[in-house]
Image (cartoon, grey):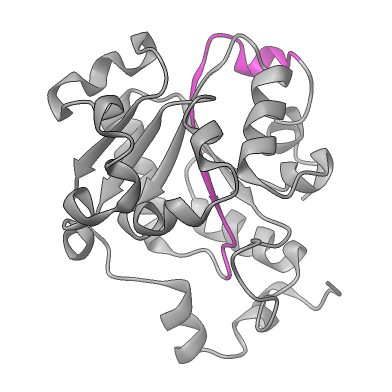
Amino acid sequence: MSSDPVSGSVALRNAARWHGKRVGLLGGSFNPAHRAHLHISQEAIKRLGLDAVWWLVSPQNPLKTAKDMASQAIRLASAHAIARDPRIVPTDVERKLGTQYTVDTLKALVDLHPSTRFIWLMGGDNLQSFHRWYQWRQIVRVVPIAVLLRPRYSGARRSARVLGPLRKALKPDRTVSRWTEWELPAIFCLEQPGVDESSTALRARSPDWADAYGHTTK
């Protein structure tokens, strides 16, 4: 996968491919990638006018245990298999950059691609735990954040702890088409039909799922 020119251009400074583009960033373990990742990405492309969504396959999520975590190579392979859309770019850029935390990854990407407009994508489950992320107050000052709420997480709009401190940064849904014009911090929530799938459920149903993508070491 490292020879993929599109994925490789993500870590290339001032890559012409991304000049002036609008790019959504979806981070996660992708252990494994699944249809809900694809759905949320395509919804974001449609509703936010994005040119692409980069899937940032994390070497190791600091908030998750390494137990039952497949190697990054296997998780990246699962992301390529599920993506099935040329606008979606699975990448191991965090490994290339040597970053562990989202805030550091975002700062590095903004520095690499100064002419690209980035927006961070997350689901309602991540919004509810966002207050636990390392330097989350800095994250919201690097790029705007779009929360795509599946029906089961619609309550996150009211219950997420970060939305108290960020109440002045919360933008109304009707303004989302102008997200590139906003001053930071800026965050908004979009209700969207969900796909009822999760990595946890997939692993429970198919404990040997990683065998389909070969055997690699961590």
Q: Nearer the viewer, residue 71 or 62?
A: 62
Question: Picture quarter containing residue 164?
Answer: top left
Q: Nearer the viewer, residue 207 or 84?
A: 207
Q: Nearer the viewer, residue 148 or 164?
A: 164
Q: Where the C terminus falls, by quadrant?
A: bottom right
Residue plotted at (26% across, 30% down):
47
Residue 86: x percent and y percent?
52, 37
Does 75 lie within the magenta span?
no
Left or right side of 171 for 38: right
What are the residue bounds of the magenta stretch? 14-31
Q: Is residue 210 above or below residue 56?
A: below
Residue plotted at (27% across, 70% down):
196
Does 22 lie within the magenta span?
yes
Residue 215: x percent and y percent?
80, 78
Q: Is residue 32 above or below residue 111?
A: below
Residue 34: x percent and y percent?
45, 65
**Residue 41 visible:** yes
Task: Name the outermost residue toward the right.
Answer: 217
Left or right side of 68 for 196: left
Q: Nearer the viewer, residue 123 or 77?
A: 123
Residue plotted at (67% across, 58% down):
76
Q: Is residue 43 above or below residue 196?
A: above
Residue plotted at (51% across, 59% down):
82
Left or right side of 191 for 79: right
**Residue 193 visible:** no
Left or right side of 56 for 34: left
Task: Name the outermost residue toward the front.
Answer: 165
Residue 39: x percent and y percent?
34, 52
